[in-house]
Each structure stands twice: as C-alpha cells, then as structure tokens.
Image (spheres, coloured by chain):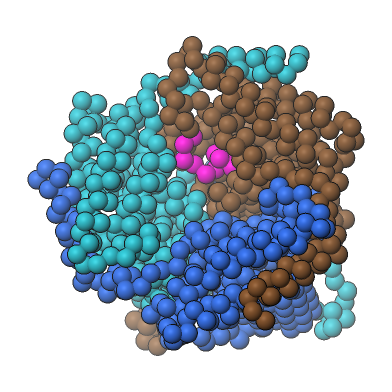
Chain colours: A brown, B blue, C cyan
Amino acid sequence: MNIDEIIQSAAKELSVNRCACEALRSADSCVLPNREMIIQVLTDLKKAIFPGYFDGETLTDASAEYYEGYLLTEIYRKLKPQIEIALRLPVSNTDPDEAESRAQAVCAKLISELPEIRRLLMCDVEAGFHGDPAAKSRAEIIVSYPGLLAIFVYRIAHILYKEDIPLIPRIMTEYAHGKTGIDINSGAEIGEYFFIDHGTGVVIGETTVIGNHVKLYQGVTLGALSTRSGQELSGVKRHPTIRDNVTIYANSTVLGGETVIGNGVIIGGNAFITKSIPDYTKIIVKSPEMIFKNPRISAGKWEI
Amino acid sequence: MNIDEIIQSAAKELSVNRCACEALRSADSCVLPNREMIIQVLTDLKKAIFPGYFDGETLTDASAEYYEGYLLTEIYRKLKPQIEIALRLPVSNTDPDEAESRAQAVCAKLISELPEIRRLLMCDVEAGFHGDPAAKSRAEIIVSYPGLLAIFVYRIAHILYKEDIPLIPRIMTEYAHGKTGIDINSGAEIGEYFFIDHGTGVVIGETTVIGNHVKLYQGVTLGALSTRSGQELSGVKRHPTIRDNVTIYANSTVLGGETVIGNGVIIGGNAFITKSIPDYTKIIVKSPEMIFKNPRISAGKWEI
Amino acid sequence: MNIDEIIQSAAKELSVNRCACEALRSADSCVLPNREMIIQVLTDLKKAIFPGYFDGETLTDASAEYYEGYLLTEIYRKLKPQIEIALRLPVSNTDPDEAESRAQAVCAKLISELPEIRRLLMCDVEAGFHGDPAAKSRAEIIVSYPGLLAIFVYRIAHILYKEDIPLIPRIMTEYAHGKTGIDINSGAEIGEYFFIDHGTGVVIGETTVIGNHVKLYQGVTLGALSTRSGQELSGVKRHPTIRDNVTIYANSTVLGGETVIGNGVIIGGNAFITKSIPDYTKIIVKSPEMIFKNPRISAGKWEI
C-alpha cells in the first residue's frame, strides 16, 4: 500500500471503531467544557483577587472598582456557558431544563464569595511568608510560589465541587497539578493559613479534612489506605483528617479515612502513618539502620 | 568598558569558543528536529485517537471518517520531515541515502498502528475509571488525568523507539514528563490496562517490562540499581520486570534488571525492593520505628 | 439580587477591601517585574549559550558572532528594565537613585560572565552524558533533559542572587521548577559537572553548597532540619554541604546546615541523613522490615 492508501485505511478503521466504542461515542451527544476557556477564567480570577500583581496595571483606589467590575463581568461571561455545558453532561445530576438557571446561580455564588476567598488567600500568603525563611517578601509568594497557585485554584474549584458541577473542578485542579506538581482534589476541606512549601509530589485526596495553620512540604501524601474496591469507595471518607497547627515535613505519608492527626502535631520527614496521632505529639522516624562501608576504615573493597 | 564593548567582547568570545567546542559545533552540520512541530503532531494524534474530546468538534458517524482522514494527513505532513531530520543526525544508524524512504515507512507504520493504539488507550481509560474512586466519568480521565497523557505519549514514542529513530522519542516523553511529572522512557515495554494515579515523580526506566493490569501511584520508581558504569550499561537490561495484576503504592521503589515482581503482587507504600518477589505476595513495609514525644505524657519539654 | 447587582456588590467589596490590605496596596506604588519578559530573556540566553540548538538556525563560524551579538543586545534591552524595576521595589536594598546605573552594571556583569557559564554548562552536559546509560547523545541532553534546563536557569539566577536583585532570581527558578519539578534555590552554590537525572521532586535549599562531579536523582531533598523559627532563620546556613564526587540516589533526604557529606560518598536510595558522613563512605539503607503475606505459602486469606 502507498501512504495515501494507508491513511485512508486507518481513517476508515478509526471512524468505524469509534462508532463501536461507547466512551468515544458519548462525546458526540454532548459538547464538553473547553479547557482553554476555564484556564482563562482562572487567570481573570487571579487578577481580580490579587489586583496589580499579574497584569502590569498600576491601580489607584479610584480605578480599582472599575478594574474589578470589568474582570468579574468577564469571568461571568466566560464561566457561565462552561458550567451550563458541564451540567448537561450525562454524568450530571442536574435536570437539563434547569442547567442554565443553575449555571447562573452558581456563577453568582462564586462571584459573591470572592471577597472571602481573597481573605483566605491573604492568610495563606501570611502563612507562607512566616513559614519560609527563604521568602524575601509577600510579593514573591503571590507572584511565584507554586504552593499559593495550587491553593488558589483549589479554593476556586472547591466551590464548584460543593455545587456538584461535573468535570470543571477536576480540569481546574489538574491545571494546577500540571503547573506545580501539587495535586489537591477539589473535594478536600482546607482551613485558613495553609502553606505548602516547594510542593512537588504533594497529593491531597478527595475526602481529606485539614484544619487551620497547617504546613506541608514537598512529597507529602494525604491518601487512601487502599483503592482496591474502586468505584465502590466513591463518596466514602477514605483520606485523613488533619487538625490545627500541624506541620508535616517532606515526603511523609498519612493514609486512611479514620486517621486523625491531632492539634499541634509535628511529623518529621519520611514518616509513614496509618493510625491516629494524639494532640501535641512530635514524631520523628527513627532512621532505618544504615550500612556504612568505608574502605579506609574496613580496609575492604566495595563496589556499588 | 561601556556596555556596547562588553556585548561585543562577549559575542566574540562566545563565537570563538563555540568553534572550539565539539558538542556545539556538531549542531551546525545538521538541522535538529523541531520540538514545537513534534508537540503539534502529538496534539493531532490525541485528537485522532479521542475524537470529540480535544477540539470542540461535534462529530457524526458520517463526518468522523473525514475528520480522521484530515488529521492523519496532517500528522504525516508534519512528522515525516522531522523523522527524516532525526535519521540524518550523526547519532543515527541509518544510511543518509535511505533517510527519506525510511521516514516515510516509519510514518506509515505509526499511522497503521493507530487503531491498535486507540484500543490500548481505551483499556487504559477503563483501568483508570475502575481503579480510582475519585473518577466521576471516563471523560474526566480522557480530558484531564495526567497519567493518561503520559501513557498516550509513551505508546506513540515507543513505536518510534522500536524503529530506532533518534531524539524524537525522547523529546516526546520529556514533553509529557514536563506536563505531568511522569517520566516513562520510550524504551520500556508496557502491557494493557495500565494506570498511573496522581503520577508526580513516577520514573519508569528504559529497559523496564510491565505486564497487564498494572497500577502505579505517585513517586514510584522502576529504576536501575546503579548507573556507575555510565555508557557501558547502554542497552543492558538494568530495570525491573513487573508481571500481571501488580499494584505498587505511592513512593515505592523497585530496582534492578534481574528483579521480577510476580503476578498479583501488591506492594504497599514506601517500599524499597531490590530482589524478586514471588507471585501473589503482598508486601507491607513494617513502619520504621517512630519516636513519639508528647509533653503532656512525658512532662518533658521538647523542641524540634 | 440579579447578577448585575451581585457583580457590582462584589466589585465594590473587592476594591474597598483591597485598600485595607497592606500586601495588596503595596503593589500599587511600584510596578512589578514582568514574568513573561523574564522568561523571554531566559529563552534568549539559552540560544546564546547553545547556538544552533533552539531555533533551527544553521550557523557558520562566520555568522556565529553576528548571531551572538544580536542575542546579547536583545538580552540587554529586555533585562535591564526588569532589573531596574526590581531594584526599585520596597524590599530592595538599593538606593532608588542608583537603580538604573546598578541595573546596567548587573546586566554587563551577567553578559560578560556568559562564556564562563557556557563552559560550566558544557561540563554539566558531559556529566549527564557519562552519567546516564539511557542518553544516546549530548544533543539529547541539551535539547530535552529537564535537569540541564533547571541547572541552566539556576546558573543564570545565581548571578543575579549574588548581586542582590530582588524577585527576579525567584521568578527564574520557579519557572524552571514549574517546567521540570526541580526546585533549585538561586542562593545555592553549585560546582562543576553537576547532573540531575529525571529530577522530579528535587529540592535544593538556599544555603546548600555542592562541590564538583555531584550527581542527584529524582526526589532528592537537600533541605533544612526545621523551619519553625521562620523569618528569624533568614540568612542562616540551614542546608547541607555536599563535597566532590558524591552520588545521591532517588528519594534520599539530607538535612541541616552543619551536615557535611564527604568526598566520594555514595548515598543509596531512600536514605534520611541528618548527620555528617566521612569521605569515601558508601551508605545503603538497610531495607525496613517487610511483612510478606502469601496465601499459597501461609494458606491464609488476606486482604489489603
């Protein structure tokens, strides 16, 4: 076969095979939310919450209200159709006849909660500044810390998750995950003054509950003990509860829906915890036994 | 010196020094494959494999064949010249006189394998849906799961790796690595129904062999025991073999080319394994001893 | 309230609340450096250091000087205003009257150091090629290895860090962190022939000192023992010192400002080290005790 025939044959096979594949055909009957548009909404939200930080605008007290009003109008214009699309997906629990009015109500809720979301995020910025000796200014945290980006996106996505909007919260948090290596499921409940330093590899599962003044480092997993039962576990609390004033150092793992990490607990690096920890406990993993080989000491010859 | 003189002097030094540097001069004699074009090809391939998911198109059974035909033509038009460039690199094993005909043959092979690649990827989607209680729909996995993106790119790159195409498979898998934190070398052999959840920090080495129905979590390394011999190890099997129905939980490490993880094995989180494991074994790392300090219990004062 | 009223009300609240928030108002009085422009500068620097690798240019020995001169002029034109902006930030230690002349001097210094930076980076490429059996060519490392990108950005940012330029070094290294999952603080001191393989999750803290011929794998943290004292620790050496010819395998952690890893030390995977290690020692973590359950052997029934 020449290349034209190969292309023809593959195109035919791909289109016939598509018709036989339920998951692929289901994309026909419905339009899907547009990822690029959702990322634009996140960018506008970031500008509205941190005016002056992401667009080179120099604001005055007088101009700020116009600036905010413009951004909120844009956010509404872009987000409402995407939510409506999501609410019409087969996986949605919403009556299609109510999709438009619900989309409008959810947008209104999100917009009216933005002042509170800003308050929470400014607390997160404070937690970052006081928690990281390498931070030179709050501006550095707002402009460049991946932890703050991931928390910002989570706090937006969480509102949509609670409103039972399909797909969009996941698209949002996976956008942040791709940018930062921090994977916060939009279903998690997270309190005030939350800080994630460095952050690459952090995973916070869907049913995690986190209190106030909690600090996590890179590679921390707050996860499930097992996912062997798959979809049967959907909706079950399978991720841990972290109370207030807890610090969890790098690469530690806390697993299980009944695991509660008490107030004021400090968990050192590399811990692996599947049971509850009482308040004000400090945990250091006793370093696993290490085998030292030193030819000058043992006169032995060693190779790796 | 004023700034113009400094620029002149540095430009001269950088150009003279370039002439003396073998690795830099070698880029002259040959054009390199274009990364942006290769990423465009991956985007077109994603649309061809998952029609309706990545472009807002609403397809009908009638229009799907035209859509696929158009995409495959684009893929061929863009990919063939890049493969030809790669086959003319000094590192290539191909006779330059045969570069064009081989590039055409390799493109034809890739295109004719796309229906099979789709079949494999739809199995991977199923594995993800059944393996993750937080997944609300298959569409969510196709549109937003980083694990699926990494596996998709790997399955394409692996075909080019087997055809001995230089550089392009690496550019593809490093693109996915950058987007997802999942580093699958294009040389690995991976079976059906493969799922990676969360995924940040996963590393799968070049000579790894993975069976069917395998599930990996974030931070899992399937790696080499040592790379001390560097290029002498090129081509040697130095990464493990994972048989069917194996689950490896977060942040576990399996090392060594002779290490075989048997059928049905479950490896808990944080394990570090350098020896073979028999079939149907479940491994839980005994938590390393932890030192608990609690001032209320010990009445002691402690500081971190 | 209808949606217009909700937008009006939220816009008013966001603008009033902004006036009350010190961290948000502080962005008014000053323009911030432009992240996109800084990334453009990094792209130009990459082309100047690795001519022929990132722009499809085919250079000759004659044209190379023009090419370099053009790029250096562009780098100066784009970078100087950004540095001047950074030097006028409230957090800067520079007298605003001297901001412009200092910005020019710092750009001149960076440009005149580029030949030396290229020399260092070509050594890093060599270290990568000899350190990774999966590397097929030096071009592959230059074009696609995330470790080299992170080290390139670090070596540029480090010059600006030493010149006490606020914010820009952090924007640079967080750009690389986002692309690669490798977080190298621009304050670290790193010697020649440095190689990071795979790299996702690597963290190298601000006061780390690394010698020559050091090789790190994914997930290695060179960090602080505790950050509990927050900003009081600013400027204190709190991250380790790594001497020459050290290899640290995947997911190992070395903590503490007084911790010194001696010459020629090899640290196996998953180690957790908070004390100094003498020269030429090889450390293997004794695998933590593992519990094996195998129904065929124990005739027991087990579930995860």
Q: Residue furthest left?
A: B1
Residue B3 shows up from this direction: yes
Towards the viewer: C84 or C139? C139
| Quarter occupied by residue B272 | bottom right
Residue B165 lies, with reference to residue B296, above or below; the image says below
Point 38% across, 41% down: residue: C37
Residue sitting nearer the eye, A9 or A186: A9
Left or right side of B88 for B7: left
Question: Which residue is at a point 75% across and 16% down the rendered structure image?
Answer: C2
Residue C44: image x %, image y %? 33, 51
Q: Is residue A145 magenta?
A: yes
Q: Is residue A230 above or below residue A262?
A: below
Indicate the position of residue C47 as horizontal and vertical percent values: 33, 57
- Report the front residue among B145 and A196: B145
Q: Is residue C115 above or below residue A120?
A: below
Magenta region: which residues?
A: A142-152
Q: Residue at x 61, y 47 (%)?
A: A175
Verify whether residue A285 appears in magenta.
no
Left or right position of C239 against C164: right
**Residue A185 in sight from this viewpoint:** no
Q: Position of residue A292 (x, y in %)?
A: 45, 76
The image quadrant that residue C289 belongs to is: bottom right
Q: In x, y percent, where is residue C287? A: 59, 74
Q: Is residue A73 above or below residue A241?
A: above
- Please state if B206 lies on the left or on the right of C48 as rendered: right
Identify which residue is drawn at 28% across, 46% down: C75
Quadrant of the snapshot with the N terminus of chain A: bottom right
* Overall secondary structure of the magenta section: helix
Q: Residue furthest top?
A: A62
